[in-house]
Image (tube, rainbow, N blue to C red):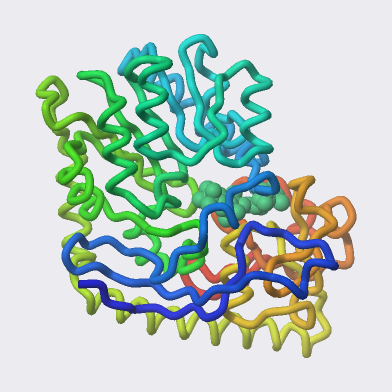
Amino acid sequence: MKKEFLDLGKQPIANKFLDDNEFDNEFFFHLKAVFDEDTNLVSLNEFVKPELMFNEDYAYHASMSETMKSHFKLLAEDLQKTYKPINVLEIGSNDGIFIRHFNPDTTTAVEPCGNFAKMTNDMDYKTYPEFWTSKLSSLIKQEHGTMDLIYAANCICHVHDLDDTFTAVKNLLSEDGIFVFEDPSLLRMMERGSYDQLYDEHAHIFSVTALSNLLDRNGLEIFRVDNLTVHGGSNRIYAKLKSNRYQPVESSYYQHIDEEKSFGLDRYETYEMFAERIKKSKKDLVSLLKRLKLEGKKVIAYGAASKATTVFNYCGIDESLVEYITDTTPSKIGKYQPGTHIPIVSPDDGFDESVDVAYLGAWNFRTEIMNKETSYLTRGGKFITHVPEVMMFS
Ligand code: JHZ
């Protein structure tokens, strides 16, 4: 049975950055999170139509961060060395940040956002500009054969129908092939109070426990789990066909299951407590921003992340509290944040001497940003985050 635990109010499409003539027709939905007591899966109560989120205008470029570029390079090297895959498929290949490390002759991509599918096709990777389904998986099998490695980063948690997704993977894997995917970790979200992992694209936030249940009923089995620091704490799951006895199940899998149980991820009460903590986080953030405003400080936001869309819309933060948001992504600059309509400017134009305090929208890149912005910090500039609690720091 699914039980609702968190209500984040009216929310827009988190990555649909707007022109000023698009404000009137903006799409909103009611963002609530539910916990399924049968599978332990945490999901949104209402799913947004995929075409509204993933299309020609999709704004998130994974390669905007040096941290992510090196993350995917290291992973590609490790997978090649450890598992020696020949035929490789990536689901949700974005701007090619991962597949660029593989041979185009034996690597296939699936990417429903037309802008990015074109980019990887131009890099000579055969890219299917479609959503991942069983039907597409059968077509790829006919055209390219089975896959030794199927990989997906920050993509499987976007998918509504997980049974179809996993069956589609199972049907395309070679006998000793592996399915590796990484998404934000539910345990880290709950520990850190990072409720902004919840937005339209993140239809689910996964625990290893829930994934184990869902993969199992679709003929797949987890054999290894890596704990990742990226994107606020993620899990990388390694799965195989249940019929494949070659890969032993490693201790990392059991450790994650135990850790989740000790935290109480299998109990509804844990989620109720989380919801109380989030209400407090909202109050604390709004009162801090109001105080800074009264003190005459210039407050902006740093990083127009999707996560910041959730926070600002949930907390009712607008231009009166945060003047503008700086972001390095060319397609976001000159546009407005979904829902709040706070302007987005390039850091070259907006991250200057006049800024006193910056809310860290991209809090998951805190180390990268702190290392980069030493002159801001030296002259007394401060950052704000809400993770794990609302605080100002420098
Ligand atoms: P970032 C997206 O989430 C969407 P978002 C998606 N659903 C998902 O799961 C994760 O990615 C993986 C900017 N920035 O990466 C770039 C600076 O301006 O946390 C980005 O716009 N300066 C697929 O959108 C934003 O911040 C910098 O120095 O929450 C960060 O967005 C850095 C490092 C980033 O993803």
Q: Is residue 365 visible?
A: no
Whether 145 is drawn above or below 280: the answer is above
Decide if residue 56 is on the left or right side of residue 295. Answer: left
> What's the residue at 28%, 34% (across, down)?
238
Residue 214 left/right relative to 237: left
Residue 317 higher or lower than 111, as above or below: below
Q: Residue at x 87, y 51 (%)?
A: 348
102 or 387, which is in the foreground?
102
Q: Residue 5 in the image: state x and y as whole percent.
A: 34, 78
From the viewer's perspective, is 266 left or right of 77?
A: left
Point out the image quarter for the C terminus. Answer: bottom right
Position in image of residue 71 (x %, y %): 51, 33
What is the total number of numbered labels drawn onto the structure image? Answer: 0
Q: Quadrant of residue 126?
A: top right
Q: Quadrant of residue 393?
A: bottom right
* Residue 301 to residue 251: above or below: below
Q: Nearer the viewer, residue 112 or 248?
A: 112
Closer-to-camera residue (385/34): 34
Residue drawn at point x = 78 percent, y = 77 percent: 319
Whether residue 223 is visible, yes or no, is yes
| Left-right relation of 238 to 250 | right
Residue 383 location (% of width, % of height): 67, 66
Position of residue 386 measured from the top left corner of the image (x, y, whole percent): 54, 71
What residue lies at 70% left-to-right and 88% top-to-bottom?
291
Judging depth in this view, the residue of 111 and 77 nearest the camera is 111
Give the quadrant of the N terminus: bottom left
